[in-house]
Image (cartoon, rainbow, N blue to C red):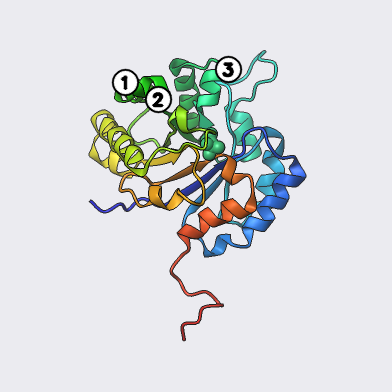
Amino acid sequence: MENLRPSIIAGNWKMYKTIEEACSFIKTIGEILPTIDAEVLLAVSFTALKPCIETAEKMNLKIGAQNMNDATEGAFTGEIAARMLQDVGAQFVLLGHSERRKLFHEDDTFINRKVLRALEAHILPILCVGETFEEREDGKTEEVLSRQLQEGLNGVEGVSKLYIAYEPVWAIGTGRAATAEIAEEAHAFIRRTLQELYGEEFAQKVVILYGGSVSPDNADSFLKEEDVDGLLIGSASLKTESFAKILALCKNSEPNVESEEP
Ligand code: PGA
């Protein structure tokens, strides 16, 4: 079946960039965005959200957050609620990133509550799932993905707009990306699982991103796969050169002013 889903290129800046660095990056990238036929997203730090949203105004660029709390408000020192993200104008939020799961001990039920809260606040959740190296070695990849999806999406209705990011933990920040075949196999499994949960229409529409050591050298191999709708990029999204090279893979076919076509 032809993949009619849009291409998505998302950057995850993690705990990098001051406001000035973030805005200067956006201005540089903003110059090539009109030539790119993809939805482009950047997950920035909380402190940079507002300035980035203002800088990206009128650009084909969505600015979002990397995390949030599941509570609507309350005595949770240091936390950020969905309505605060909504208030600042964040358009999406990464949830369940493996660094949050591992370093901050987030489990599927906690992540699930955040997904529900984000949807209530009309912020697009990007639910990150993925197996560790040991789980893959033990043949448990599908079991883990299935659990993370079922529990992470518990109570979510099939009409909801959300993205999934498949990020094998062993490929994140290691320089050891999955092969395109491994990614496609996992993405197809995720889509089948979502089909069982929500039916064919939802499964065909839902966007599934691949993340884990994506670089300008391997990005194209993933984008060619049927069930890979886009990329979630960490370190290669931090430099304008490497991010621009990946974006250039999605150049639109419309002739632009410099075109040599008559
Ligand atoms: P990486 O990070 O591209 O540096 O592996 C991906 C991610 O953590 O989303």
Mark 2–mark 3 Cα distance, whole angstroms, equals 17 Å
Seen in the image, is 143 located left or right of residue 53? left
Residue at (71, 49) in percent of width and height: 23
Residue at (60, 29) in percent of width and height: 83
Reading the image, the residue beneath label 1 is 140
Q: Secondary structure at mark 1?
A: loop
Mark 3 is on which residue type? Answer: Phe
Q: Is residue 250 visible?
A: yes
Reading the image, the residue beneath label 2 is 131
Residue 231 or residue 2, whichever sits in front: 231
Reading the image, the residue beneath label 3 is 104
Residues at circles 1 and 2 in contact by the CB criterion of under 8 Å: yes
- Residue 96: % across, % down: 49, 25
Residue at (52, 44) in percent of width and height: 10
- Residue 118: % across, % down: 51, 30
Mark 2 is on which residue type? Answer: Glu
- Residue 187: % across, % down: 33, 37
Q: Secondary structure at mark 3?
A: loop
